[in-house]
């Protein structure tokens, strides 16, 4: 038997009751004065009654014990006891609150089944987790079942992929070894066989209540909404890709609430029930593009997707004099770069030219002035090691023929990084020499473009922002993974607005094929009645016992056996 | 003590009440010698009308009592003896302890009515009646004398009785015994609640040399008290307190104690031939008193 109160509180209460009742027994009665013609008979009666005491010192032991038992029963009843018969296993109920549950009355049915079954689970060993964008406990071990009702108020399916299976894996990993565990899945999601195969022998997974199934027949949904740099090479435009699943799915597209011109869209080849739509040259000015499936279907949460487009302005570059023309040609060929004569974002020049103290600079230096072939000067707060690791790929340095360079210069070619007041790149001017093939290689324009973008701090943009998935940059000019304000990986819990590092607002969408068109997985077995603990309400028995004892006390009182 | 606890002389001296007593008589089988002429048969031989015996003449006897018929027949002189009718001394011992003045209505009211009724009955048949109120001790309020006219004084004295502190039967009856009064009828009107207990009361009663009539003033609540809860009971006479939790067991023990008390008084009356009138103080006195007088007479 378990109680809502802790055993310490329960035992303390019982002791306090025993003490209190003992004191009450010992307390002098406050007698009400009454004048009578004689006390003769009362005196004799009292003498006679005293001849019947139970023990010498404690007059009313039976009365004390009786009232102690009654009070203890009531106290135990107050402790909210539950009685279950099972092995000492833990019980965890995973309630699916993902978008899948928005089909029909799945959520309400699942919650009804939960309410119905949770009372039978041992209170001190049961836990109910609501699996939505975030997994949160709605009933912890020891908590009263009524709290569950309170916490489930207002719960509705979220536009997020199901996290039940992920939570199940985590639970299995984190569980106490050797302690049996039963997991009851409440909702329509299935568990893949490979996950079930991972279950230890003393862990069982059952379905709680009826299985509504994960699929929603006739459902259509948007499974992808992403952006890429415009194939037209227009720097400040992007192409938008929309993928839908299901039949007869016309998509309405708007940018900042205004419909996009139909002429801009290209219908890509259809694969099965997948339809892809490409929208070319959408201005990348930070607007929100929204795709909406027209017409209704059983699951409305996947019928709409939103994405904030990147802001892609040209980078203003000031070219110094005397530079190798190849540098200027590479810069002019870059659609994202505009050569200016003043107020630049980035300066590209030779060593010895007047150098700005505030503008990031790509400086071609004499190899004698620095040991490293390329030296990255980065912000103080960034680790040099991280900068090196990221920049090696981002700057396209893997394509540089360093062995040839080393042979010509007779020096060790290396990449270095150190912190400084602002970003700078210092590269040997030897790299531009005609004796060396770097300028003529395909890596050179990429290096120049990447160097300018790294120096300007122009961040990449996420190709897509899907609920439940880590948000990543597509371009290599910034850290690949976008982090949230706390520094953790940005993983939107649900569709809606999220803020990345630096407060940049993003729009996340469901975009989950597993929700829109779930794979067929074997349905979980329903929990057999023998697997569920048989619980009954001992409060009723305690109440009956207390009433019976009160009746006994009344009879004893009436017959004069207790005072 | 509230004024209403006792009765005024006017209330006591109710003509209707007294009129209804005229058909009641107290008859003694034989009263003691040396009484005053009255209506009770006495042990004295005298000038009554009821022949009782013969006895031989002796010098100095009244010649008028010689039975000449016997003399002619036997030639011996015998006197005819006639039963002398004398009075029956009635001693009214009225309890005026505090307990009789408690409760509502106080028992003293019934006690006073009863005392006056018995006084009236005895006085109207020329018996001498004395009044002896008692509490912790006994006093002679009205010396035993006959005379119907004395009834008013009885009423006045009874109405003026003040409550005494407590009851002490042993001392009361010792004092009464020391008065060496002519043997008569000793009427004790009391609730018999003596703090020393009923055994002490009965022992004292046994010392009375008179015929005894006990008038016990009681009420239903004495036998079955309607008391529930925790009380500090204060004895109105002694001021003694008893802390009582009136449980069913205690009330049962009370009832048993009271039953023993009741049995002791009844047993005394049965063994000694004393009269016992249970006077319910919540009921009318006269009908209860009339019950004592079988066919209008109470034979002592």
Image (cartoon, rainbow, N blue to C red):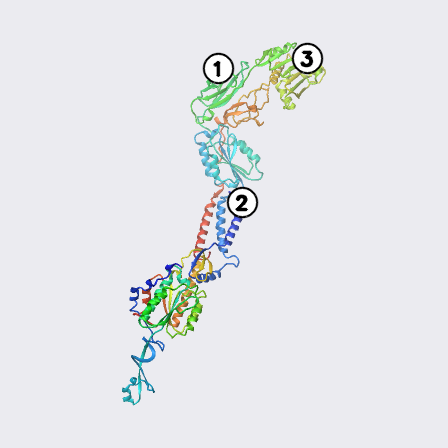
The image's mark for residue A352 is: 3
Residue B296 percent coordinates (x, y): 30, 69
Q: Nearer the viewer, mark 1 or mark 2?
A: 2
Q: Is residue A449 above or below residue B265?
A: above
A356 displayed left or right of A56: right
- Quadrant in which residue A398 is drawn: top right
A40 displayed left or right of A8: left
How far apart are the alpha carbons under marks 1 and 3? 49 Å
Q: Are marks 1 and 3 in contact (CB under 8 Å)?
A: no
At 52% across and 33% down in the image, what residue appears? A136
Callout 1: helix, strand or loop? helix
How far apart are the alpha carbons under marks 2 and 3? 80 Å
Q: Nearer the viewer, mark 1 or mark 3?
A: 3
Residue A457 percent coordinates (x, y): 59, 19
Mark 1 Cα-neighbour bin, 10 Å: few <14, some 14–19, many ≥20: few
The numbered mark, 2 or 3, whose residue comes first in the sequence reads: 2
Q: Is residue A424 visible?
A: yes
The numbered mark, 1 or 2, whose residue comes first in the sequence reads: 2
Chain hosting mark 2: A
The image's mark for residue A9 is: 2
């Amino acid at each position: 038997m378990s109680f809502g109160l802790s055993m310490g509180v329960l035992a303390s209460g019982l002791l306090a009751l025993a003490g209190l009742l003992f004191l009450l027994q010992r307390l002098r009665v406050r007698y009400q004065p009454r004048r009578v013609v004689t006390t003769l008979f009362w005196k004799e009666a009292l003498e006679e009654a005293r001849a019947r005491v139970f023990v010498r010192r404690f007059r009313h032991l039976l009365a004390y014990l009786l009232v102690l038992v009654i009070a203890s029963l009531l106290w135990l009843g107050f402790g909210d006891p539950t009685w279950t018969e099972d092995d000492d296993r833990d019980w965890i109920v995973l309630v699916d609150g993902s978008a899948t549950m928005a089909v029909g009355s799945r959520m309400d049915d699942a919650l009804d089944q939960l309410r119905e079954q949770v009372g039978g689970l041992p209170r001190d060993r049961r836990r109910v987790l609501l699996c939505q964008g975030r997994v949160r406990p709605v009933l912890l071990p020891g908590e009263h079942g009524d709290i569950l009702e309170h916490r489930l108020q207002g719960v509705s399916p979220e536009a997020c992929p199901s996290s039940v299976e992920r939570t199940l894996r985590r639970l299995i990993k984190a569980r106490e070894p050797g302690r049996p565990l039963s997991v009851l899945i409440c909702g329509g999601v299935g568990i893949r066989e490979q996950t079930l195969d991972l279950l230890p022998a003393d862990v069982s997974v059952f379905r709680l209540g009826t299985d509504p199934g994960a699929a929603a027949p006739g459902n259509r949904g948007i499974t992808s909404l992403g952006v890429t740099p415009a194939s037209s090479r227009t720097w400040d435009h992007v192409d938008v890709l929309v993928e839908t699943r299901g039949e007869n799915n016309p998509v309405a597209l708007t940018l900042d609430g205004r419909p996009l011109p139909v002429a801009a869209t290209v219908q890509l080849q259809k694969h099965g029930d997948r339809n892809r739509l490409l929208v070319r040259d959408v201005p990348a000015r930070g607007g929100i593009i929204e795709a909406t499936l027209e017409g209704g279907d059983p699951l409305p949460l996947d019928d709409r997707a939103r994405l904030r487009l990147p802001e892609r302005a040209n980078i203003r570059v000031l070219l110094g004099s005397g530079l190798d023309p190849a540098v200027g040609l590479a810069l002019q060929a870059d659609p994202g770069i505009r050569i200016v004569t003043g107020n630049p974002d980035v300066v590209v020049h030779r060593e010895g030219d007047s150098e700005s103290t505030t503008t990031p600079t790509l400086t071609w230096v004499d190899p004698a002035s620095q040991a490293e072939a390329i030296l990255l000067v980065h912000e103080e707060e960034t680790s040099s090691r991280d900068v090196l690791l990221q920049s090696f790929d981002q700057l396209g340095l893997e394509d540089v023929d360093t062995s040839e360079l080393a042979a010509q210069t007779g020096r060790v070619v290396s990449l270095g990084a150190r912190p400084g007041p602002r970003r700078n790149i210092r590269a040997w001017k030897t790299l531009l020499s005609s004796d060396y093939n770097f300028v003529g290689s395909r890596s050179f324009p990429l290096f120049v473009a990447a160097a300018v973008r790294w120096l300007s701090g122009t961040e990449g943009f996420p190709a897509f922002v899907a609920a439940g998935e880590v948000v990543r940059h597509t371009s290599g000019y910034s850290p690949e993974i976008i982090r949230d304000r706390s520094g953790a990986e940005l993983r939107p819990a649900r569709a809606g607005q999220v803020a990345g590092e630096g407060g940049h607002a993003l729009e996340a969408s469901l975009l989950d094929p597993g929700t829109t068109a779930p794979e067929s997985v074997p349905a979980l077995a329903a929990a057999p009645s023998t697997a569920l603990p048989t619980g009954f309400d001992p409060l009723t028995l305690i109440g009956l016992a207390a009433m019976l004892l009160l009746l006994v006390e009344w009879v004893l009182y009436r017959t004069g056996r207790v005072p | 003590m509230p004024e209403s606890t006792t009765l005024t002389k006017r209330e006591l001296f109710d003509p209707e009440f007294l009129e209804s007593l005229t058909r009641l008589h107290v008859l003694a089988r034989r009263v003691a010698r040396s009484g005053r002429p009255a209506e009770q048969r006495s042990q004295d031989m005298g000038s009554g009308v009821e022949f009782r015996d013969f006895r031989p003449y002796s010098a100095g006897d009244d010649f008028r009592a010689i039975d000449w018929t016997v003399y002619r027949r036997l030639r011996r002189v015998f006197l005819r003896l006639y039963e002398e009718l004398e009075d029956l001394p009635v001693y009214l011992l009225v309890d005026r302890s505090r307990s009789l003045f408690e409760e509502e209505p106080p028992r003293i009211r019934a006690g006073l009515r009863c005392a006056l009724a018995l006084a009236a009955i005895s006085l109207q048949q020329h018996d001498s009646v004395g009044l002896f109120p008692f509490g912790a001790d006994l006093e002679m309020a009205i010396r035993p004398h006959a005379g119907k006219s004395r009834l008013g004084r009885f009423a006045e004295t009874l109405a003026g009785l003040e409550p005494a502190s407590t009851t002490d039967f042993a001392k009361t009856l010792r004092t009464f015994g020391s008065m060496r009064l002519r043997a008569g009828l000793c009427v004790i009107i009391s609730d018999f609640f003596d703090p020393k207990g009923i055994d002490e009361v009965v022992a004292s009663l046994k010392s009375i040399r008179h015929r005894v009539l006990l008038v016990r003033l009681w009420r239903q609540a004495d036998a079955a008290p309607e008391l529930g809860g925790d009380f500090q009971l204060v004895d109105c006479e002694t001021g003694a307190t008893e802390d009582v939790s009136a449980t069913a067991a205690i009330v049962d023990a009370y009832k048993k104690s009271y039953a023993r008390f009741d049995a002791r008084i009844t047993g005394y009356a049965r063994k000694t031939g004393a009269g016992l009138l249970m006077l319910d103080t919540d009921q009318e006195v006269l009908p209860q008193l009339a019950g004592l007088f079988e066919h209008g007479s109470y034979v002592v």
